[in-house]
Amino acid sequence: MKLIAPSILSADFSRLGEEIRAVEAAGADWIHIDVMDGHFVPNITMGPIIIEAAKKSTRLPLDVHLMIENPDRLIPAFVKAGSDWISVQVEACVHLHRTVHLIKENGAKAGVVLNPATPLSAIEWILNDVDYILVMSVNPGFGGQKFIETSLDRIRRIRGMIEKSTPDSRTSPLIQIDGGVNDETIERISSAGVDVFVAGSAIFGSPDYRKTIEEFRRKLG
Ligand code: DX5
Ligand code: ZN
């Protein structure tokens, strides 16, 4: 499966509904929403009220990437607002297993996110509990950063870990990549074994969203 998830972090926020409808019409599969708290990452973005507004603008699944400390206290509010998929940073979770199950109990799909320098062993014992694994290929906080090349090896290793622990591909977690995905990097990233491609600046910074997404799909094969 190969899915494209535009990150609205690079959208024009003064026309957010319009921007979301535009990427839906252009062929996006998910809408990726970056939540930042100014503590876990050095930037502040949006909260549940923006998820609620996004939900009214699209029928696509909302994929909410929580870059926040202590996510447990806000997970019910994010699900209630309309999040379909929620991922949490492993570095921000003291009780990761509990947090993953909290997301599921509230009715959303659950994912775990690894920063570029976090050892892969952090997710080894939770692979069978999650619906997706997000590999950060930039240090989180901002759009438009350069793809970190070592992410490719990390993806290949996670693919190997998944094959070992959940041999049935129908139940195995998806692998998602986030950061520096563009026309030049997407082919290599895809060959490493990624299912879901988050792209912010490469889509919202382009003059024709449909053309950009079509070009991505051509490169995904
Ligand atoms: C970074 C965010 C990303 C960001 C990606 O902290 O998690 O989702 O929007 O931006 P690009 O695609 O521009 O690297
Ligand atoms: Zn993100």
Image (cartoon, rainbow, N blue to C red):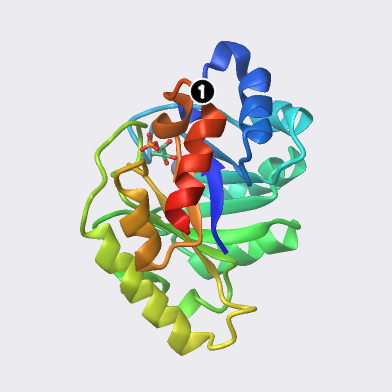
Q: Is residue 55 left or right of residue 204?
A: right
- What residue is rendered at 48% in x and 34% in y? 212
- What residue is rendered at 47% in x and 59% in y? 221
The one nearer the camera, 183 or 175, is 183
Residue 153 picture location, percent across and down: 26, 67
Looking at the rendered structure, the kind of residue marked 1 is: Ala
Residue 210 picture location, percent across and down: 56, 32
Q: Quadrant of the N terminus?
A: bottom right
The one nearer the camera, 52 or 91, is 52
In this rendering, the answer to whether 135 lies above or below 32 is below
Quadrant for residue 113, please give it.
bottom left
Q: Is residue 170 left or right of residue 52?
A: left
Dot 1: element: loop
The one nearer the camera, 195 or 8, is 195
- What residue is rendered at 35% in x and 41% in y? 183
- What residue is rendered at 74% in x and 28% in y? 57
- Residue tagged by mark 1? 11
Q: How many residues crowd around disc 1 within 10 Å: few (fewer than 14), some, or many (20 or more)?
A: many
From this viewpoint, which residue is outermost toward the top? 14
Residue 105 picture location, percent across and down: 73, 63
In this rendering, the answer to whether 139 lies above or below 44 is below
Residue 188 picture location, percent across and down: 31, 58
Q: Is residue 116 left or right of residue 43?
A: left
